[in-house]
Amino acid sequence: MTTVHIVGRGIVGTRLRRLLDTGPVMLHDGYWPDISGTSPGDVVVLAHGGSVAERVRRLAARGLHVVTVGDALPDTISLLDDPPEHQGTSIVLGAALSPGLSGLIARHLANQMASVDEIHVAIHGTAGPACARVHHRSLSGLSPGFRDGEWIDFVGGSGRELCWFPEPIGAKDCYRARISSPYVLQHAFDDVSRISARRSARRRDRFTAWLPMLRPPHPEGGVGGLRVEVRGADERGARVVAIAGIAELVGTAAAATAAAFVTGLLDGLLHEGIVVAGDAELPTVDLLARVESAGVRLQEFTGIPQR
C-alpha cells in the first residue's frame, strides 16, 4: 500500500495526520532525511518551514509524489519556471490556505462565469509560530502583483484595502505582502489580466516588519479567514463579481486542504507533473467537498442575509 509521509510536526502536520485515517501514514520531524523509509509511489507532504525547492526536486526524481503546504516565494518561482524531473508522479505546489484553498475557490467561482479577468485574494490570521514568522516578514520587501499581463513589484505593506471576511471576522485592513499566491493563480489562470493578494495587518505589524518579531508568536492564532473575489462577465457580457471564503482556524483549514489533495492523489484524480490549486483540469468540486468533509465551512457572499 502507498505510504504517506508527513514531514513537519507543527499544527498543520499533526492535524493532517489525524485527517488521513486510511492507509499507512507516518509523521516525521522537519529534518527527516529525504530518502529514508520511502518507496517509489509513496507520498511525501512537506509541512515544515524553510525552503523546500531542492528537497522537492530530489524527492520527485526518486519517483515520489510530493505535496507542499508552504508559500515561500523563491520556491514557487523556481518550481514553476523550472519544473522538477519526475517519474510520472504528481507534485502539488501549495496545498494550504493560500495558495491552495484560494485557488480551488477561485476556480469554482470562475466556472460560474463566461469569462474572468480579475482575481483578488485576502488572508487573515496565521497557524503556528512558523506561519506567524512568515506573516511578519511578508510585509517587508516587495510584493508581487499581476496587472495587464505584466508582473509588478509593489512595496510590501502598501495598498491598504478594507476587506470583508466571513463572520465572525468582519472587516479588516489588508495590505500587499510578499506571498506566492499571485504566481500560483497566474499559472492556473493564464488568461486573467489582474491578480493580487493581500493579508490583514495592524499599523504596528507594518512598521516593525523589517525587524525581528518583538515577542514570541502564539502557539496558534485565533480564527483566521480567506476571501476570494473573482470579477468577470456573464454570457450576455454584463459585469459580474463573485466572492467566497471561510472563517476558520488557519491550521485547520490548511490541513483540510492538504488532506483533500493527498486523498485525491491516492484516488488517482490528479494529473502528473506540477499541480496547482485552480488548474482547470482538476476535479475542483470534488476537492472542495473533501475540504468541507474535514469540517471547514465554505461561505459565499450573496448580499442577502441568510441563516
Image: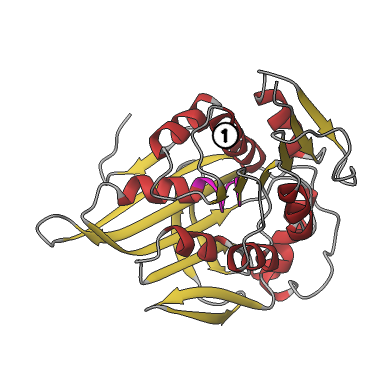
* Quadrant (top left, top right, bottom left, bottom right) of the C terminus: top left
Q: Kindly identify which residue carries mark 1.
A: 265
Residue that lies at the very extreme toward the left in this rendered image: 236
Stretch in magenta: 93-101
Residue visible at 71% across and 75% down in the picture: 207
User: Looking at this view, is 17 or 58 the one in front?
Assistant: 58
Rendering coords of residue 54 (x, y %): 78, 59
Rendering coords of residue 121 (x, y %): 47, 59
**Residue 208 belongs to the span the image colors magenta:** no
User: What crowding class fits label 1: few (fewer than 14 Cα within 10 Å), some (14-19), or many (20 or more)?
Assistant: many
Rendering coords of residue 224 (x, y %): 59, 45
Residue 241 is left or right of residue 251, and the answer is left
Rendering coords of residue 63 (x, y %): 71, 42
Main secondary structure of the magenta stretch: loop
**Residue 95 belongs to the span the image colors magenta:** yes
Residue 23 position (above or below residue 307): above
The quadrant in which residue 89 appears is: top right
